[in-house]
Amino acid sequence: MPYDNRKELPKSVRDNLPAHAQDIYKEAFNSAWDEYSNPDERQGDASREETAHKVAWSAVKQSYEKNDAGDWVKKAS
């Protein structure tokens, strides 16, 4: 179930990530959804959706991190 826009993202993503990070999440999720359609491409018994969410969070964490207040902020260059 790829996402067409930010409004369709899970509430936990919309409520916690800044707009740019949500865009990263959406694009990474959609890409992984397509890439891991074959169960043989996934690790263990993870579902297609579970795998896509893991990939999406990993993509976000490459550019964003939580600060001391627990908010997601862009990593310093």
Image (cartoon, grey):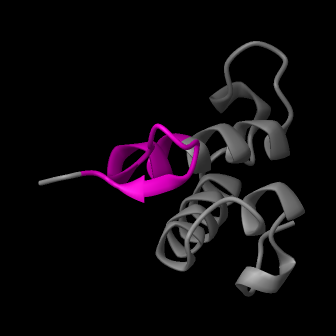
Q: Is residue 29 above or below residue 6?
A: above
Q: Residue at x 77, y 76 (%)?
A: 3
Left or right, residue 63 beside residue 46: left
Left or right, residue 60 beside residue 44: left
Residue 9 x/y as whole percent:
80, 70
Please give the range of residues in magenta. 58-75
Q: Residue furthest front?
A: 69
The N terminus: image quadrant: bottom right
Q: Relative to the observer, which residue lies in front, 58 or 65?
A: 65
The C terminus: image quadrant: bottom left
Q: Is residue 57 above or below residue 21?
A: above
Residue 52 x/y as whole percent:
69, 47
Q: Relative to the observer, which residue lies in front, 71 or 63?
A: 71
Q: Residue at x 69, y 59 (%)?
A: 16
Q: Relative to the observer, which residue lies in front, 44 or 23?
A: 23
Residue 49 x/y as whole percent:
83, 46
Left or right, residue 4 beside residue 24: right
72 in magenta:
yes
Residue 47 x/y as whole percent:
86, 34
Q: Residue furthest top?
A: 44
Left or right, residue 22 beside residue 76: right
Q: Is residue 75 above or below residue 51?
A: below
State the count of labels. 0
Q: Residue at x 44, y 43 (%)?
A: 67
Q: Residue at x 81, y 37 (%)?
A: 50
Specify the quadrant of the image occupied by residue 22: bottom right
Q: Residue furthest left?
A: 77
